[in-house]
Amino acid sequence: MVEDEKYCIDILTQISAMTKALESVALGLLEDHLAHCVVDAAAAGGPEADRKIKEASEAIARLVRSYPLWSPTARPPSWSCSSH
């Protein structure tokens, strides 16, 4: 869209929609992983349970750190805005 010089607001709308879709997929995957893999490992106990819980905690931390997509101090990529 950028290369086709689409209107900036249209590009931002598409980015927002894609971001929300990816967030939804990530949260669904995390929920499924917690409900099955982590719960099963925790029920079995032992080192595998510890590993799965640590792994899930690290994944949650990465997911939390990824929000917001752009921090207030971050600069988005530079391109010129067409005036469609």
Image (cartoon, grey):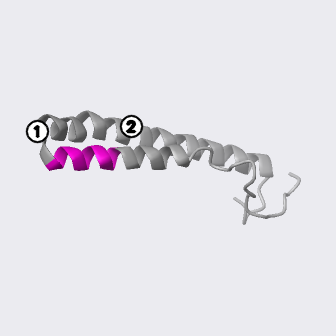
Q: Residue furthest right?
A: 83
Residue 23 percent across, percent down from the top left: 50, 42
Residue 36, horizontal then vertical, whole percent: 22, 37
Q: Residue at x 69, y 59 (%)?
A: 1
Q: Give the residues drawn in magenta, as a range.
A: 47-56
Is residue 49 part of the magenta span, yes or no?
yes
Tell me the residue that label 1 is attached to. Answer: 44
Residue 44 vs residue 79, the one in the foreground? 44
Closer to the camera in the image, 7 or 41: 41
- Circle on res. 28: 2
Query: Residue sitting at 54 percent across and 48 percent down?
Result: 65
Q: Residues within 10 Å of mark 1 (few under 14, many from 20)?
A: few
Give the amino acid type for the residue marked by disc 1 in the picture.
Answer: Ala
Q: Is residue 65 left or right of residue 30?
A: right
Q: Is residue 59 magenta?
A: no
Name the kind of residue labelled 2 in the image: Gly
Identify the disc placed on residue 29. none
**Residue at 71% over, 51% down:** 11
What residue is shown at x 85% (from left), y 57% (from top)?
82
Task: Tell me if residue 50 comes above or below residue 34 in the rendering.
Answer: below
Task: Name the foreground residue: 14 vs 47.
Answer: 47
